[in-house]
Amino acid sequence: MSSLSAPSPKPRLDLLAALKRALLSALIAFGLFSLLIGIRTHTGSNGALVISGRPDLLAIMVGLTFVGAFVRELILGERVLEMGAMLPPALRARLQMLPKLAAPAMLAFAIALPILFYHNRYMLDLGIMILTYVMLGWGLNIVVGLAGLLDLGYVAFYAVGAYSYALLAENFGLSFWICLPLAGILASFWGIILGFPVLRLRGDYLAIVTMAFGEIIRLILLNWQSLTHGPDGISGVPRPSFFGLPFSRGDDGFAHTFGLQYSYTHRIVFLYYLILVLALVTNLVSIRLRRLPIGRAWEALREDEIACRSLGINTTNTKLTAFAMGAMFAGFAGSFFATRQGFISPESFTFTESAMVLAIVVLGGMGSQLGVAVAAAAMLGGFEFFREFAQFRMLVFGLAMVLIMIWRPRGLVATRTPSVFLRNRKKVDAELVKEARST
């Protein structure tokens, strides 16, 4: 047998197959965009709803889809585009150093944001909203990322925290600082209540039950009018104070006490740093819990529940603690949401909120604290960036999610750092984790 192997034949360019796949992609795009872009509704002169077509815009979108799919088939065919292999080794080595510098840089920017944008109310409100979702994402990351329990009803604990603070402050006159831990405890209690019925459920069945739990809580808030005021919500939720100093114009106010000129921005900056501290506490507690035996039990449960039981781990307590801890942080975030808004209603706690927080966790990388923060900033900041293009915002958002799932199927930050190691800390690449190979 000859030692020289025959050269592998070059892949043949199949124009007919590329044309068929491009036409199929265009047909799917036509079905998706025909209602999203091809039809427009607006109010007529007599107040009636008028439906008009936009065939030109629909044709452009379908044509772009056809051309893009055809070019992709000609260039790649059935091959997968490896972005990492296209970069020079030196550039790849520098890019691998970015995660180590990203966390300190993001923290420094978060601390300096009120100083840089003190007179920009829009940026301050956007920062508060992003930090709120970062805190929610880190709380859900305990349940989904560490314990591997798919929770679609996380907004229920968010609502419990908000209504707990509002009702305690309204009926008993308690301050924010007293209601904050109470809201977390009550939300944690409801997390345990949810955990018991779903102990034997996994995967899709667990997701359906948790989603139903979230809807049950919303319907209770909507219909128990004697307690929650129903769809009217609760208004006049007390604002937090700075160690007893209210942010008001009076002589006992914050500005007068420190000799400052009164400004409404003082309260906004205080709320920003308050949610920043709460988010950092959530991050530190999550990191610490991951290194404790309970955190390692969560990760073992995520990887294989049967093997987890064979090792003698009490899976019941492990699941309940995951639900309780995640719910507690959602309760803290809900309490802050109530005091920041000053008004809460059941419409603020729909399934869309749970889907948004879950998307942040999945896109950022399940189990990754940095990835959750990056995904929250990217998603919410992207929503605000495309606010002027309202009709294309959801389309671009969906396209971005698809591209990220193709490019980074395990999330933006997919590397895992083992919580226990023998000699040297070593990151495990996502591909090796996926294929269950050791390094």
Image: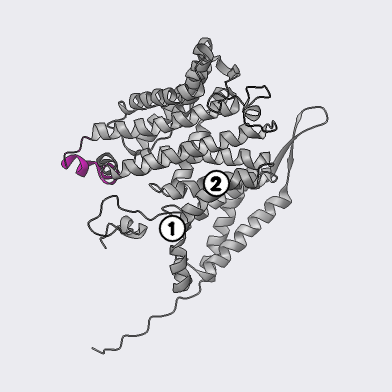
Q: Is 118 on the left-hand or right-hand side of 417?
A: right
> How is the rendered protein coloured?
one colour
Q: Is 397 on the left-hand or right-hand side of 285?
A: right
In the rendering, at what x and y percent does residue 425 appear? 30, 58
Specify the segment rendered in magenta. Answer: 299-314
Q: Does the magenta stretch include residue 321?
A: no
**Label 2 vs label 1: CA separation?**
17 Å
Front in this rendered view, residue 177 or 313: 177
Q: Does the magenta stretch include residue 304?
A: yes
User: Is residue 393 in view from this perspective?
Assistant: no
Q: What residue type is labelled 1?
A: Lys
In the rendering, at what x and y percent does residue 188 appear? 37, 27
Q: Which amino acid does label 2 sit on?
A: Ala
Quadrant of the frame with the N terminus: bottom left
Q: Where 183 falls versus 397 (above or below)?
A: above
Front in this rendered view, residue 85 or 91: 91
Main SS of the magenta segment? helix
Using the image, tell me which numbered label, if any, was put on residue 100: 1
Using the image, tell me which numbered label, if any, was put on residue 278: none
Using the image, tell me which numbered label, if any, was put on residue 110: 2
Q: Which residue is painted at 62% across and 22% down in the image?
A: 252
Q: Which residue is painted at 38% across and 47% down in the image?
A: 367
Q: What element carries label 2?
A: helix
Q: In which quarter of the image is residue 210?
A: top left
